[in-house]
Amino acid sequence: MTIALQRASVLDGARPVPGGPFDELLAFISEGAAERDRERIHPFEIIDRIRHARLGAYRLAKEDGGGGSTIRELLALVIRLGAADPNVAHALRNHFGFVERFARPSHSPHRGKFARLIASGAIVGLANTELTSAKVGGSPFQTRLSPDGDGWRLDGTKYYSTGTLYADAVIVRAAGPDDRTLCAVVPTKRDGVELLDDWDGAGQRLTGSGTTHFRNVRVEPDEVVFDGPGVGYGVPYTNTLPQLLVTGIIAGILQNVLSDAKDLLGSRKDRHFYYATAASAAEDPLLQEIVGEISSAAFAAEALVLASADALDRLAEARERGLPEEALAHEAAASAAKTKLIVDELTLTSATRLFDVGGASATKRSKNLDRHWRNARTLASHNPRSLKARALGAYELTGEPLPAQGFF
């Protein structure tokens, strides 16, 4: 079905209201997250609060009206968002990628326009994937941009448009004249744009990752960026940050698994198995051991994500200063890939062990504790670990560089 967005869009002239500190916002996001996931209640109000708090401008430069955060600070925030509600965190992933590709680089076409968009609080989604493509995440695209007077017309269909259901604008990957690949950044409420809520994955059910149709959509000249050397998706390893953002969200899920494990064990005061080694579950050394292992896994996951974020910060600094970046970009991609392999495994294992702490009653649908495994498994499946591991192994053994485009 088509979802009609019942709100004023920032692009329609709504004035963003200054928000409170992110601590309060994160607490609000966390409240009711399990119920929203269970009942499939879309977080429109939450996205509005994020918009008003201008959380999406956290990484934008201060001189452009943003928070001026480092990538490490951004990933620390994303981990906390993932712990509060991984659906909301993932709905923002493509937005943060847009900021890094188009609103921050000084040489990016129409950078001023895009920076003002982000500074206003607007949220940006992505429409990239086409099921007709034999190469997942790659081109050529059947979605096309055709000349129309002093502008363009856009036609095509995209799938898995994460975040777009809640967004003010959407990045559309398309082919232009001579099959040149490009990005069109258009308002989601423009005539001819249709957003469908048809994502039916086992997890991440509320990420707004449905189908998007573009039918004869008008596109203005300053809404188009053609890929090129050092521009947009033409930047080598341009997807390392979005890939690390996914892993950061999974690390956030692991933080939530730890919280739920502690709550579960603390709530089991009067009931325990008759043959257990302790009178109460909270005093059982075997169950304490499980919580300790989950705690250690959560610590390690966060540390790995932030270490990979440091590698991206070194790369960002080199790019801003015009210094050689090729080796730093490859190092950051390798770090993010290694982090993914470990964090995915730690989280999926911990999400299963959570039920060893809670027993059969923990499987009640009302508790919805299976959401942790479902959400982590769905996110991890975006980029198969076996392909990442093979690429890393080839690099270690033969020096074969990691793929510079796509999911690296």
Image: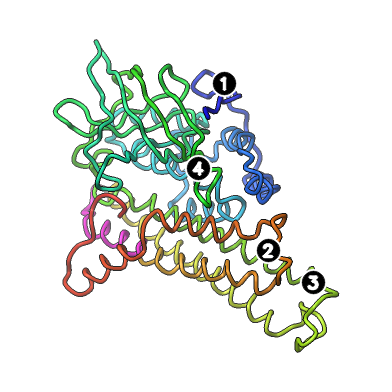
Q: CA distance from mark 1 to mark 2?
A: 44 Å
Q: Position of residue 115 (x, y in %)?
A: 41, 31
Q: Nearer the viewer's eye, disc 1 or disc 4?
A: 4
- Three-letter amino acid code at the position of disc 2: Thr
Q: Is residue 1 left or right of residue 213?
A: right
The span from disc 2 to disc 4 (Cα, nearest Å) is 27 Å
At horizontal 56% and vertical 24% (from top left) the residue drawn is 4
Instruction: Determine crowd level at label 2: few under 14, some 14-19, many 20+ residues with C-alpha closer than 10 A.
Output: few
Residue bearing mark 1: 14
Q: Secondary structure at mark 4?
A: helix
Q: Which residue is mark 4?
A: 91
Residue tagged 3? 268
Q: Position of residue 241 (x, y in %)?
A: 38, 51
Residue 16 in sight here: yes
Q: Which residue is mark 2?
A: 363
Say which of marks 1 and 2 sits in front: 2
Above or below: residue 378 compared with residue 219: below
Query: In the image, is residue 33 above or below residue 171?
Result: below
Magenta segment main secondary structure: helix
Q: For the residue marked with disc 3, what is the amino acid?
A: Arg
Whole-percent x and y of residue 261?
67, 68
Q: Nearer the viewer, mark 4 or mark 3?
A: 3
